[in-house]
């Protein structure tokens, strides 16, 4: 990969630090270049830091709760509600207050990170794998394969996801559907996310592949006798990594919001599992008297979505400097 | 809470209630009122003590309610909010004054019914001088009662309870809306009901419900021919008020706009001398919908307003702390318990049921439902104000160890777990307990607390929260679903009689296998079933109370369910409203007794 002069001088003071620049030219891999650009984006770095923090919180939730001296997320203590059953607010022992069941809100917010990240990351990963696979196939083969997959995408995109979620929630609530295979919970949310979001990835990948398949390196591979699958997944796929990463990163917050929405509507994760959307729903009727119950999971959701969005923007700029703001 | 009566409707079966039975011969009905024993905080109003006279005439009352009405046809209505309208607009044969749940008063009837032919013939004299509202305008006769009774069997009217109460009326079981052989007007003002079995007391008792509100055939027939009947949308009144209507009698879109409003105006044909209702108000404007926190505050801080459904918890707290004189509490408004499957699953074992009862923190569950202001800790199945309550143990309840500690007693629970065959004191079986609860607050919190209780006892659980109506209609009320635990079921009675409280929910002979069942725990113990059949035939308030108290004791001994809440229904009013609540309708405001200060 070549680097233009403008970039050589970008880090130096008016281009005087030539020796250092030339050393950097020699040492940089594409990954290093990407990292260098990303590092300069302070907003993206803060967001990345927050995302890493979230991942650590999710993985080490039991340990963190223990270190902070909080009760577990499912420990009910009605002594922490007043005579009317209204929950008590933030205190030293319960920094985020408690809910109607006397459960510690901070502890539940920490555990709620697990659900949000699980749904956001796993759902997006599945959608990405499906979308990329079908997108490459459609863009590479074109013709009836492309038509079939593209029309399928049109059909899938016409499915109202929230209504489908509500429908599954209503129809499969207790015994499940299809012999218990489908029942409300994390797996159904991940399924819904994958069902809808692969289509967006598909369209992006298909468009890129339609262009890439006409490039010389593909012709060269074909001339060398490479199979179609090798061309698609060994030659073309690496060129899709950057846009796919960017788009997937931007999908994660959308999926976290979708999980929160479905949980808010009562068809998400099953109680007593802690979920931010479910907590916000439960807090709605008592917001006037228990502001903390909605505020803290709401803030957690806000900052998480914001962090993923800003990180996605940063990744896009770093991976494709021509689109930089 | 409000829809509990709808639930009862689905399962009313067989013999019920004899509160009015004595009307025909004596005054032996109970004089106790449901509020006599409930715990009411100082300064709070309660229907039993509110004045029924001396109100100021005139003015417009503004009513707010978040829920809509269900059915405004007297032949179909069976919901507390619907009853608010019915009480002001319709006159049934017998009715309760607001301050009683056990003493019925002749209303459209001139006098108590005459029972003859070994309780197989009922004769009732209709009051003269009662007129229908416009556009019918004429006097009510016995023929209007005959048509009102005929039409409840009309599938287009879809009355939910008539077979449960009136199955003994000759021809009723096969009726489809046409004339019923056993229902006749033998004179202009004389109504006769002929029965095939000696069940006159039950039929008479049910006459406080609105199936006995008269309906003019010549006017209503064309509406009843439609499916569903349109009579409710074109109804005429006999009470002091009527839903505002067009000159042709059309109510829909004028006096009642679904989801938005209802307007009650004076019935110009109502004659005060024929009625015990004072009807102080000139008009009642009902607004439907809105945020309960907003409308509740409007009522407490506003003027000439009442809220007719249950105030939100924060509003209730505000009312108790700052507006106590504007708060009314009605005890004896029902009960809530955890239904446990007595027939299938792990809880077939009585000791596991006792362990569950012992481990349940009923105080905590009541706190989740709003605390002491709106609940009393339930210790057995009969409730305050109903004959047999004291005999069954009163507020303290039966002396059994699993009922002693309302906060739950894990040591006692472990004792019964061991007796059930689990030496560690924890459940080690393989069965997963299926719990189905109500997804709306505060019921969902109760369900989660119950779920935790079972987990503490070692059970593996699967908790599902669904909509209130779905909980009953698809799961807890369906025998084949075999749900192990339904933590949010509740019961209200149509009459202040112990049989009305215990028979349908706990009599195994009344389990409805194909349809909506209200014996949610599939309680089916032959000894208890037989005792109920015998107690149903007992006559006299005291004797019935004693008989059903013994059944209550048996139900506790078998731990057929875990009772946790005797409900007290709260209502709120503005400072300048002299509200009168109806004890018999979970404290809902009576528009024909309420006045403005």
Image (cartoon, coloured by chain):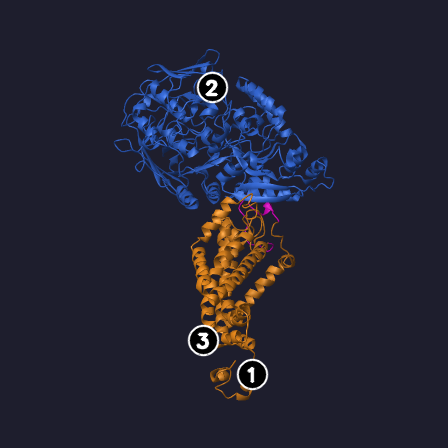
Q: Are marks 2 and 3 in contact (CB under 8 Å)?
A: no
Which range of residues does the magenta coloring cover? A75-93
> Could you say whether the residue bearing mark 2 is in a helix, strand or loop?
loop
What is the chain identity of the residue bearing mark 3? A
| Residues at marks 1 and 3 on the same chain | yes
Which residue is found at the position 50% from the left and 66% from the top? A136
Tell me, for residue B113, which label it has, or none. Answer: none
Badge 3: residue crowd in 10 Å (few <14, some 14–19, many ≥20): few
Chain A on-screen colour: orange
Q: Which residue is mark 2?
A: B168
Residue position for label 1: A24
Quadrant where the image shows the C terminus of chain B: top left
Please give the chain letter of the residue carrying mark 1. Answer: A
Q: Classify 10 Å Cα crowding around label 2: few (below 14), some (14-19), many (20 and above).
A: many
Secondary structure predominantly adopted by residues drawn in magenta: loop
Q: Is residue B13 within the magenta segment? A: no
Residue B593 lies, with reference to residue A210, above or below; the image says above
Q: Secondary structure at mark 1?
A: helix
Residue at x 50% of width, y 58% of height: A255
Identify the mark nearer the N-term, 1 or 3: 1
- Residue toward you, B226 or A290: B226
Chain that is blue in the image: B
Q: Are marks 1 and 2 on the same chain?
A: no
Q: Which residue is mark 3?
A: A322
Label 1 to label 3: alpha-carbon separation: 21 Å
x, y percentage for residue B229?
36, 31
Mark 1 crowd level (few <14, some 14–19, many ≥20, 10 Å Cα): some
Residue B269, horizontal then vertical, whole percent: 29, 25
Q: Position of residue A246 (x, y in %)?
A: 50, 68
The image quarter containing residue B310 is: top left
Location of residue A188 in the rendering, given as x and y in whole percent from the top left corner: 53, 52
């Amino acid at each position: 990969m070549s680097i233009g002069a403008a970039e050589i001088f970008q880090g130096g003071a008016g281009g005087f630090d030539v020796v250092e620049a030339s050393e950097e030219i020699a040492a940089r891999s594409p990954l290093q270049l990407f990292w260098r650009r990303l590092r300069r984006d302070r907003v993206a770095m803060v967001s990345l830091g927050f995302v890493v923090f979230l991942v650590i919180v999710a993985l080490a939730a039991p340990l963190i709760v223990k270190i902070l001296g909080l009760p577990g997320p499912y420990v009910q203590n009605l002594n922490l509600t007043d005579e009317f059953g209204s929950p008590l607010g933030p205190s030293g022992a319960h920094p985020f207050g408690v809910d109607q069941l006397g459960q510690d809100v901070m502890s539940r917010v920490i555990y709620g990170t697990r659900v949000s990240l699980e749904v956001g990351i796993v759902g997006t990963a599945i959608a990405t794998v499906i979308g990329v696979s079908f997108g490459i196939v459609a863009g590479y083969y074109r013709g009836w394969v492309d038509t079939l997959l593209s029309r399928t995408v049109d059909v899938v995109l016409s499915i109202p996801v929230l209504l489908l979620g509500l429908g599954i929630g209503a129809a499969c609530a207790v015994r499940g559907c299809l012999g218990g295979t489908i029942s409300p919970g994390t797996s159904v949310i991940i399924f819904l996310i994958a069902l809808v979001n692969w289509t967006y990835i598909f369209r992006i990948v298909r468009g890129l592949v339609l262009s890439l398949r006409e490039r010389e390196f593909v012709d060269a591979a074909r001339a060398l006798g490479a199979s179609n699958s090798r061309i698609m997944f060994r030659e073309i796929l690496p060129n899709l990594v950057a846009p796919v990463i960017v788009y997937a990163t931007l999908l994660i917050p959308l999926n976290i919001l979708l999980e929160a929405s479905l949980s808010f509507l009562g068809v998400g994760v099953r109680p007593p599992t802690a979920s931010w959307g479910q907590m916000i729903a439960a807090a709605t009727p008592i917001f006037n008297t228990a502001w903390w119950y909605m505020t803290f999971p709401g803030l957690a959701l806000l900052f998480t979505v914001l962090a993923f969005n800003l990180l996605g923007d940063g990744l896009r700029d770093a991976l494709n400097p021509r689109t930089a703001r | 809470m409000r829809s509990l009566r709808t639930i009862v409707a689905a399962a009313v079966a067989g013999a019920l209630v004899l509160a009015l039975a004595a009307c025909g011969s004596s005054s032996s009905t109970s004089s106790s009122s449901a509020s006599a024993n409930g715990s009411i905080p100082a300064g709070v109003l309660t229907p039993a003590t509110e004045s029924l006279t001396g109100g100021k005439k005139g003015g417009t009352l503004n009513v707010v309610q978040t829920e809509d009405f269900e059915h405004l046809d007297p032949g179909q209505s069976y919901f507390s909010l619907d009853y608010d309208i019915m009480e002001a607009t319709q006159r049934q044969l017998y009715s309760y004054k607001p301050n009683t749940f056990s003493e019925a008063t002749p209303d459209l009837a001139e006098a108590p019914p005459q029972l003859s032919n070994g309780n197989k013939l009922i004769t009732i004299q209709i009051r003269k001088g009662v007129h229908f509202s416009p556009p019918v305008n004429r006097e009510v006769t016995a023929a209007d009662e005959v048509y009102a009774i005929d039409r409840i069997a009309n599938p287009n009217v879809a009355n939910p309870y008539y077979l449960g109460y009136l199955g003994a009326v000759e021809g009723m079981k096969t009726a489809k809306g046409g004339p019923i052989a056993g229902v006749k007007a033998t004179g202009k003002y004389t109504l006769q009901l002929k029965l095939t079995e000696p069940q006159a007391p039950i039929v008479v008792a049910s006459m406080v419900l609105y199936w006995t509100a008269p309906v003019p055939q010549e006017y209503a027939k064309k509406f009843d021919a439609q499916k569903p009947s349109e009579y409710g949308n074109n109804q005429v009144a006999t009470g002091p008020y009527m839903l505002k209507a067009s000159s042709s009698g059309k109510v829909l879109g004028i006096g009642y706009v679904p989801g938005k409003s209802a307007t009650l105006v004076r019935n110009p044909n109502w004659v005060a001398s024929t009625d015990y209702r004072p009807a102080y108000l000139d008009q009642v404007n009902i607004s439907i919908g809105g945020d309960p926190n907003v409308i509740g505050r409007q009522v407490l801080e506003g003027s000439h307003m009442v809220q007719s459904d249950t105030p939100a918890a924060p509003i209730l707290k505000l009312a108790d702390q700052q507006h106590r004189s504007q708060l009314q509490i009605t005890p004896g408004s029902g009960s809530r318990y955890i239904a446990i499957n007595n027939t299938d699953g792990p809880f077939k074992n009585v000791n596991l049921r006792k362990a569950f009862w012992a481990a349940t923190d009923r105080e905590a569950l009541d706190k989740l439902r709003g605390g002491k202001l709106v609940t009393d800790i339930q210790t057995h199945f009969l409730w305050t104000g109903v004959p047999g309550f004291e005999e069954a143990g009163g507020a303290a309840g039966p002396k059994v160890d699993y009922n002693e500690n309302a906060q739950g007693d894990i040591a006692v629970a472990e004792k019964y777990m061991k007796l059930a065959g689990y030496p560690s004191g924890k459940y080690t079986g393989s069965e997963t307990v299926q719990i189905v609860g109500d997804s709306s607050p505060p019921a969902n919190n109760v369900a989660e607390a119950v779920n935790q209780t079972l987990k503490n006892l070692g059970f593996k659980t699967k908790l599902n929260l669904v909509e209130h109506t779905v909980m009953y209609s698809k799961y807890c009320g369906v025998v084949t679903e075999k749900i192990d635990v339904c933590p949010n079921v509740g019961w209200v009675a149509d009459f202040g009689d112990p049989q009305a409280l215990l028979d349908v929910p706990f009599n195994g002979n009344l389990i409805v296998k194909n349809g909506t069942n209200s014996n949610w725990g599939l309680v089916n113990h032959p000894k208890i079933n037989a005792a109920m059949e015998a107690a149903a035939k007992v006559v006299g308030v005291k004797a019935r109370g004693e008989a059903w108290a013994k059944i209550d004791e048996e139900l506790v001994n078998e731990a057929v369910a875990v009772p946790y809440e005797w409900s007290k229904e709260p209502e709120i009013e503005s400072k300048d409203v002299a509200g009168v609540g109806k004890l018999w309708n979970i404290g809902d405001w009576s528009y024909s007794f309420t006045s403005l200060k």
